[in-house]
Image (cartoon, rainbow, N blue to C red):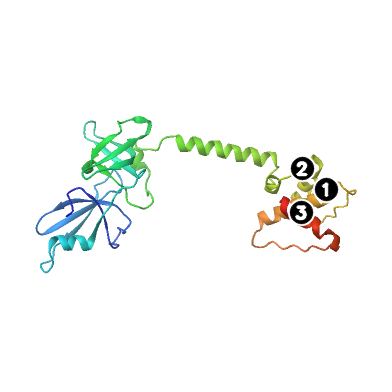
Amino acid sequence: MFKLNSFVSLKFNKEDISSSDIGKLKYFDDEQFIISFFENPDQEPIEKVFNFKEDVSNEEFMESILEEVELTKHTRIYYFNHEDEKWYAGFVNSQDLNSVECVFTDNILPTQYYPNKDVYIRLNKPVSDPSTFLKKYISENKYLSDKREKYAKFMIDQRAISFGISSILSSIIDLTEYQIQIVSRILKDPIQRYLLSDEVGLGKTIEAGIILKQFVNDFPLQFQCWWCYNYCFVIVWKIINKLF
């Protein structure tokens, strides 16, 4: 039997509520039951009312519509604290029948079990208006933002070092400065018609490999290449393919 304030989901889509949305059993009596769904802290939860049928027992009818949900670890939750009348964002650590163990960022609230009636799971859809959360002082901590910032800076630095030529970064061999200059000159020229004719052993094949790899990166679905070479160079090109 479903308990009051237990977390449930519908077994089918109903209007703007999908079967993946998690709500709570807010109310039930001998005639009906109500499921509430949380969307944002600035409005009342969305309520779906279901009337019992005479030819089916109440318990069977509820089981045909509802499915009890076990909250997985790290599920995002929103908790309303009645003491200071504020909202807090956290995530699930564990769950029992009537409460949820919640962990809050920066330990703004103690990690402990909080009653189901004060814990909410947001609807599984994009936030239409972020200001509804911001004006309630609900925002994510900077942990992920700081990690993304470091990664973005690293990528920007790598792109600057490679002059925006991503194929240089994918090469597993060390390139010389003059090879990078030649490749950069060719790729930046709007009319890319060049003949690589350096002396033997200066890396013409490597330069061609970098250029071809860049074309593959930039035009993966439109790229075409014609290789015309003597049979003795087959082994050389097989090696070049492995380098890029």
Q: Nearer the viewer, residue 202 or 139?
A: 202
Disc assigned to residue 239: 3
Q: Which residue is drawn at 62% across and 39% down?
A: 156
Q: Position of residue 6 (x, y in %)?
A: 22, 49
Residue 72: horizontal and vertical position, in percent? 34, 47
Q: Where is residue 58 in the image (x, y as percent from the top left)?
A: 13, 61
The picture places residue 170, in percent across and down from the top left corner, at: 68, 47
Up/down of 146 relative to 225, above or below: above
Residues under numbered marks 1 and 2 in contact, where contact means CB atoms less than 8 Å apart: yes
Q: Give the residue type that dot 2 points to.
A: Leu
Q: Which of marks 1 and 2 is nearer the N terminus?
A: 2
Question: In the image, 230: left or right of 19?
Answer: right
User: Pointer 3: residues within 10 angstroms few (<14), some, or many (20+)?
Assistant: few
Which residue is most to the bottom?
55
Q: Name the residue under label 2.
A: 175
Q: Earlier in the sequence, mark 3 or mark 1?
A: 1
Residue at the spot x=67%, y=63% of the render? 222
What is the spatial separation of the Cα atoms under label 1 and label 2, in whole angstroms?
9 Å
